[in-house]
Image (tube, rainbow, N blue to C red):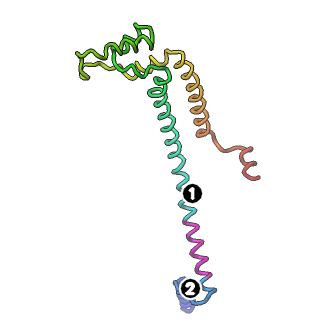
Amino acid sequence: MSTQNNTNNNRTQRRRKRRFTIPTTTRQFQTCLQRLSLKGLSCLFFIADHAMYLLGPLLIALASVIIVGLTYLYFCVMLPMMAGTNWIVTVDDYHSYKNGGGHHAALSSSAASEGEEGQTNNDVEHISTIQSILLAVTTPTGIFHTAIVAFFLINVTYNYYKCVTTSNSGKVYDSVVRE
């Protein structure tokens, strides 16, 4: 019975020690502050560690969206502007460009036909984005710029893929981490 009383007394003393008391002396205040700051730092490191696991896939998705967006911007906006084919919007413009011998002949024929009325905006048939891109790629400027852009696009995509999928383990990696 006395051993049971001793264990109960020990438990009661431990509970009393764990209870929160308002610090009254400088030493008690410093001890309390150290304990709270260690718990706060521990919680902060836990959150930061888990945020890093979430941040990796988010940055991969962000980089992929940026690469796809820039590729779309180049092919749909920049390439037709650089090749000089961005004014070709309708099928009539396309035929005058192809039959008239290029940009200058087609511009003069479209300027002459601007004064004619007979078609409204609803009756005009527009060319597709793919046709506009293919028309721009067939010009010498389009070929040159597309070759450069394709080179950089393939290199960036390949290097990014290798960075994401390469494992960080092995003897060399472990020795670098130790140093």
Residue at the spot 50% in from the left edge and 38% down from the top edge = 66
Residue at the spot 44% in from the left edge and 21% down from the top edge = 133
Q: Which residue is mark 2?
A: 17
Q: Is residue 36 magenta?
A: yes
Q: Is residue 4 magenta?
A: no
The reply, left or right, for residue 176 in relation to residue 82 is: right
For residue 49, the mark is: 1
**Tag 1 and tag 2, C-beta contact below 8 Å:** no
Q: Position of residue 108 (x, y in %)?
A: 39, 13
Residue at the spot 74% in from the left edge and 44% down from the top edge = 172
Residue closer to the observer: 172 or 32: 32
Q: Position of residue 115 (x, y in %)?
A: 29, 16
The reply, left or right, for residue 116 in relation to residue 142 is: left
Mark 1 to mark 2: distance in Å? 32 Å
User: Which residues make up the magenta segment?
Assistant: 30-43
Amino acid residing under circle 1:
Asp
- Res. 61 visible in picture: yes
- Is tag 1's residue or tag 2's residue first in the polypeptide sequence? 2
Question: Vertically, is 56 above or below 158?
Answer: below
